[in-house]
Amino acid sequence: MSTEAGTEQGSSRLTGVREWAGRLLTVDRLREAGILIPFVILFVVLTLTSDAFATRVNLLNVLDQQAAILIIAAAGTLVLVSGGIDLSVGATYSLAGVVAAHYALETNVVVAMLLGVGAGVLVGAANGFVATVLRINPLITTLAMAFIVGGCAALISGGTLIVLFDEPAFGKLAQTVWFDVKTSIWIMIVAVAVIALLLARTTAGRYMYAAGGNAEAARLAGVRVDAVRILAFVLSGAAAGLAGVIDTSRVMSAQAGAGDTALAFTVLAGIVVGGTSILGGEGAVWRTVVGVLFIALIGNGYVLHGFDPLYEQITMGAILLAAVGLDVWIRQRRA
């Protein structure tokens, strides 16, 4: 009897260990921790292989250059989580910069900046209305909107570069230094923190997860899915507008179509690499931040080591493909 009891006890302990290990290695935990592992490895490798990488100047420069992308990507996470996608953020970013620069030469600098952000809000609201009320696929909606918005930006700028060197006050938004850190970085930290709290800690955030996970079940539970998705698009547009104004302040110039497609691709790549599902219902802003910074460190590493930038594009594409493939694999494992 004692031998049987001991065997049963041992078997019970073994089963408990296996269950614990299973919980520890679930696909959900893999999704959450996945981006941190390559990020830490890359950071350590770059630190060991480049004396210039882990310096305060270089790291702050990376954050300054990525401030706008981080703001857009944080809000873009809301759109993907709620079941949509926004490919117009690059054009909206460009439009906001052009609007702000144009009106900075005509009116008050503060008013010009508010108009730039307001332009982003309007684009986001239009995206949300068309995608939810008119029931046009968000991919097509935002792709078409990117062309429309890009054309509007070109009309406002006249197809030329708008230079603001005669308006030094405009540069204070992004170039002012507090505690040895530029205000562009401080604004980014505040904006990303607010968006992260909205998604993780508010009722609106929970509704976004519900809308993206199972829209029909969410509707039956009383969630106003269309309103939630419109809110996500509006916040995405506002973030793109703010980012456009910040970068215009940082470089003191704006031009229609300047890097629209590349920026939209980088934002989407950062969100997906960070573990947000392209199909909606899953994701977190902090993981998006890590995903964007992971891609930024790759670019920084290529520059510091003098590698051909063409290989950076190949690396980016491979990483994005791998991230989407991982998302599909995880969903298949759950099915």
Image (tube, rainbow, N blue to C red):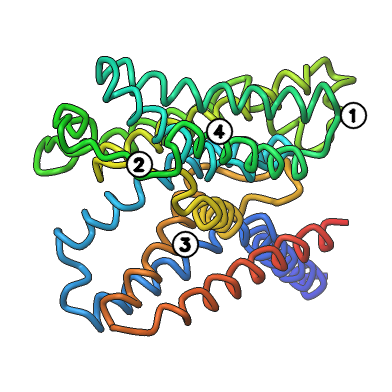
Depicted 144 relative to depicted 236: above or below:
below
Q: Residue at x 76, y 48 (%)?
A: 279
Image quadrant in which the C terminus is located: bottom right
- Asked whether residue 37 is in view, the answer is yes
Q: Which amino acid does label 4 sit on?
A: Cys
Mark seen at residue 152:
4
Distance of mark 1 from mark 3, alpha carbons? 33 Å
Give the secondary structure at mark 1. helix
Front-most of residues 125 and 23: 125
Give the secondary structure at mark 4. helix
Report the residue marked by disc 2. 254
User: Where, by quadrant of the figure, is residue 188 drawn?
Assistant: top left
Q: Which amino acid does label 2 sit on?
A: Ala
Depicted 180 relative to depicted 327: above or below:
above
Q: Which residue is drawn at 77% across and 43% down?
A: 140
Asked if residue 62 lies left or right of residue 87, the reply is left
Sequence-wise first label, 4 or 1: 4
Sequence-wise first label, 3 or 2: 3
Report the residue marked by disc 3. 36
